[in-house]
Image (tube, grey):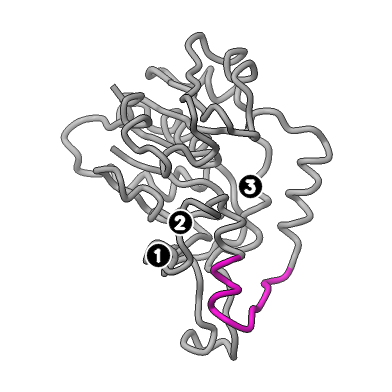
Amino acid sequence: MLLLHGLGATGGVWRGFDGLAPDLPGHGTAPWDDTYTFTRHAEAVLPLLDGLDEPVAVVGHSMGGVVALALAALAPERVRRVVGLGIKVSWPAEDAARAAALAQRPVTTYDSRAEAVDRFLRVSGLVGLVAPEDSMVDDAVVDRAAAGEGSGWRLAQDPRTFGVGVPDMAGLLAAVTCPVVLGRGEHDAMVTHEQLAALVDDAVTLPGLGHNAHVEDPAAVLALVG
């Protein structure tokens, strides 16, 4: 499997899964880019599939789910199935404007690692799911002194990643030839079952789970891979 994290997270969120889990550009240990789009993210991870003997299942969370669809459209012979989990598919103008504004903000410096970690957990929606002392957060924050940037701490995430844009879900789904499963957690406030059901025939809602269902219950998400 290829496992693609959501906006603000890192590949570490997939530790309950067996597969390739890269940090997408502008996140974690991955380099920052000049601009960010779903297609450019897909192009960045495509080399990971080089040399594999057979097509893979690609599981993506939120933004990563859109990247999974873009990858399947880009390289249909390498992707056998896409599972998109918790993708935000409805984008009112104010939501798009808010994301664009976040992309224009400068890098924030925090006085302590604890403050930077707290911000990472909030941005990624992992508050209450991942403890601040969990090793999962190690690649999500940067000691600016150790990086030769001065003092304090910052997120590893490039703020410009918020400018990735609004996904053309209908266009992507039309371009993908492999089976696609769109799912969400029952308590995911980012997307409703009805919104997903308007895009695919068999939308899935996972009982009792939230937006980060893959962190809460990896087995429930693995069952969607087939």
Could you tell me which residue is drawn at 46 percent across and 25 percent down?
Answer: 206
- Mark 3 vs mark 2, foreground winner is 2
Q: Mark 1 or mark 3: which is in front? A: 1
The amino acid beneath tag 2 is Val
Image quarter for residue 52? top left
Mark pair 3, 2: CA separation: 25 Å
Image quadrant in which the N terminus is located: top left
Residue 107 on the magenta span: yes
Q: Which mark is residue 134?
A: 1
Q: Report helix, strand or loop for mark 3.
A: loop
Q: Amino acid at mark 3?
A: Val
Q: Is residue 146 above or below residue 127?
A: below
Q: Is residue 25 left or right of residue 59?
A: right
- Is there CB contact under 8 Å for labels 2 and 1? yes
Q: As shown in the figure, which amino acid type bears the numbered disc 1?
A: Asp
Q: Secondary structure at mark 2?
A: loop
Q: Which residues are magenta?
A: 106-118
Residue 164 image label: 3
Residue 113 location in percent, x, y? 53, 78
Mark 1 burial class by Cα count in 10 Å: few <14, some 14-19, many 20+: few
Per the model, the C-alpha gap separating discs 2 and 1 is: 7 Å
Residue at 20% of width from left, 31% of height from top?
Answer: 54
- What's the residue at 26%, 44% (across, down)? 19
The residue lying at 27 percent from left, 32 percent from top is 56
Dot 1 or dot 3, earlier in sequence: 1
Look at the picture and state if 195 lies above or below 87: above
Q: Which residue is mark 2?
A: 130
Do labels 3 and 2 touch, CB within 8 Å?
Answer: no
Q: Secondary structure at mark 1?
A: loop
Residue 9 percent location from the top left of the image: 50, 54
